[in-house]
Image (spheres, grey):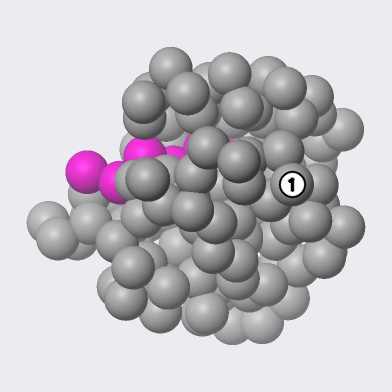
Amino acid sequence: MSTILIVDDHSDIRRLLSITLGKEFTIIEAEDGKSALEAVRRHHPKLVLLDVMMPGEVDGLQVLDAIKTDPATRDILVAMVTARGQTSDHDDARKRGADAYFIKPFSPLQVVSWARSHIL
C-alpha cells in the first residue's frame, strides 16, 4: 500500500483526509513543517498533502522547496491543500514544484480521485 503524508496544523483536516484516504493508502500525519520534513525523510511517502500556513519555523512552501530540491525526495508528489486561493499563490506553488493545488474548503472526493489517478 502506498504511503501518504498529511501535513496540516488543524487536526480536523488531517482526520478528514485520513478517513477519506485511509482505506486505500497508508496514512501518516504531521502538524507542522519541521515534523513533516522528518516524516518525509523517515517514510519517503508517495504523496504529501501539504498546508501552506502552519505555525513554527517552517511553513508549507519551505517544506515544498525542501522536498523538490533534494535529489532523494524530489520524486515525491506534493499537493498543496490550503486556504490561500489567489492565482499568485497557486502560480508560486506550481513554480516551486507542486503537483496539485486544492483550495480550502476542498472536496475530499476530489483529493481522493487525484491521489488515485497519480499513485495507483
Is 81 on the left-hand or right-hand side of 80? right
Q: Residue at x 29, y 61 (%)?
A: 44
Residue 12, image x, y percentages: 87, 57
Q: Eyeballing the image, is 109 above or below 84?
A: above
Question: Horizontal placement of 57 versus 26: left or right?
Answer: right
Residue 78: in magenta span: yes
> Against 5, is 39 above or below?
below
The residue that mark 1 highlights is 19
Q: Is residue 116 visible?
A: yes
Q: Is 24 placed above or below 91 here? A: below
Seen at 72% across and 38% down, the residue is 20
Q: Is residue 82 left or right of residue 27?
A: right
Q: Examine the residues drawn in magenta and state their main secondary structure.
A: strand
Q: Nearer the viewer, residue 25 or 52?
A: 25
* Nearer to us in this view, 56 or 9: 9
Q: How many marks?
A: 1
Which residue does the image show at 36% across and 26% down from the upper left?
120
| Residue 28 x, y percent position in the rendering | 54, 64
The amino acid at mark 1 is: Ile
Considering every residue shown, the one lying at the far left of the view is 71
Local crowd at mark 1 within 10 Å, few (<14), some, or many (≥20)?
few
Residue 33 location, x and y as percent?
Answer: 55, 72
Q: Is residue 90 visible?
A: no
- The stretch in magenta equals 75-80
Q: Residue at x 43, y 36 (%)?
A: 98
Q: Quadrant of the N terminus?
A: top left
Residue 104: where, in percent of width, then height?
82, 35
User: In this orientation, which residue lies closer to the viewer: 43 or 58?
Assistant: 43
Tell me if residue 93 is in the magenta stretch. Answer: no
Residue 109 in which image quadrant: top right
Label 1's element?
A: helix
